[in-house]
Structures are given as structure tokens and as C-alpha cells.
Image (cartoon, grey):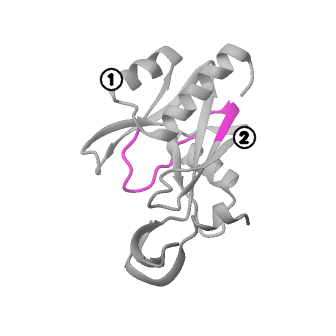
Amino acid sequence: MDKKREIWQEKTIQSEQIFQGHMISLQVDTVALPDGKSAKRELVKHPGAAAVMALLDGKLLVVEQFRKPLERNQIEIPAGKLDANEDPMEAAARELEEETGYRAKSLKLLRAFYTSPGFADEKLYLYVATELEAGEANPDEDEDLLVEAITLEQAEAYMAEGRISDAKTILAVYAWKLYVATGSF
């Protein structure tokens, strides 16, 4: 590693888990800074997630659901956390079917990205699903979802209205828009 990059490294001195939940855990790390001082870092540990940009007859499948942190409904692409040691593609297929009832004959990884690397390690895998077959939705017990197939124009209007405001769905809409314009992702 070159000298310039070494100054950016922070060595963990101590790590304390302060919460272990069903979906996330929280920890506070004490780190040594390059100048010899120390600092605290609050971290959210997350198992990762998979999301699906499912295209059906020129429309995007979305779900609307209440999001407690926002205290309002949100329109999003189907998504969910990875189970222990679960392949992200299998999680994407599972979430698509559970939330919308559709199965994809074709699933392709579009991108994987970190949602908020300043405080969380969640890595989200975004898949494109095509060649969809209708089935029966089977959402989790605590999920109340409305499924809709929307046009690109509707998606852009929902973003302007703030009804679509999460990063994964915005990224999916822009990728879809690029696909419509160029024929490739």
C-alpha cells in the first residue's frame, strides 16, 4: 500500500456490540487515527440485501408499503435482506415471488453497492428480472403490500412527488431509462 493511502486507515482498538436485533446489529468501535488520536465509530452491521428491477410488458413492478422510519407509504422495487449464507440471486428470486407473485426466467446482476458506507456495511445486490411468469404472492406476515406495474413516466412522476425516494428504486428507474434509450444496461 502506498504511503498516501496508509494515512486513511483506521485500526480498530476496541469493538463493543450494543444491540443485536433480527435484522441489524449496532456496535461502537474505538479506532486509532493516523495522527495518534482515537475516535469512536458507530456502525450498523447488516447481512446484505437483494433487490429486483422486474420488467413486465414494458412496465416496472413495484410495491407500495408503509415505512415506519419515514412514517409514510413508499413505492419501491421488491427487495429484502439476505438470509444467512444465502446467494443474493436466490434472495432476489425469493423476494420477487414473495412480494409480487412473479417468477423470473431470467435474473441478471445489474450492480452491487453499499447503501450507506459512512455508518453501515449493508451491501445491496440489484438484479434485472425479465421473462416473468405470474404466480401467487406470499408476503411475510408483517408485510402489507400493494403491487403495481408502472410506466417509466409514472416512475418519474412518483420520484418527483417523493413517493419513490429510496436509492435502490431511483437507481433502478435510471437504469431502466438508460435501457429504454440505448437497449442495454
Which quarter shows the C terminus?
top right
With respect to residue 151, does 185 lie above or below? below
Neighbours of disc 1 within 10 Å: few (<14), some (14-19), many (20+): few
Which residue lies at the image location 47% right of the left edge and 39% below the top edge?
167
Residue at 29% in and 51% down? 69
Q: Residue at x 42, y 78 (%)?
A: 38
Q: Amino acid at mark 2?
A: Leu
The quadrant in which residue 64 appears is top left
Say above or below: 9 vs 163. below
What secondary structure is marked by label 1? Answer: helix
Kind of residue at disc 1: Glu
Residues 31 and 163: in front is 31
**x, y percent for residue 39:** 40, 74
Few, some or many residues within 10 Å of mark 2 (<14, 14–19, 20+): many
Residue 22 visible in the snapshot: no
Magenta residue span: 127-145
Residue 121, position as x, y percentages in the image: 53, 62
Q: Can residue 112 be spotted in the picture?
A: yes
Relative height, residue 31 to residue 149 (above, below): below
Which label lies toward us, 1 or 2?
A: 1
How many labels sit on residues? 2
Main secondary structure type of the part rendered in magenta: loop
> Percent position (x, y) of residue 172?
57, 32
Which residue is farthest left? 71
Quadrant into which the N terminus falls: bottom right
Q: Cα distance, mark 1 to mark 2?
A: 30 Å
Q: Secondary structure at mark 2?
A: strand
Which residue is the site of mark 2? 107
Sequence-wise, the earlier of marks 1 and 2 is 2
Residue 161's disc number: 1
Q: Is residue 6 left or right of residue 155?
A: right
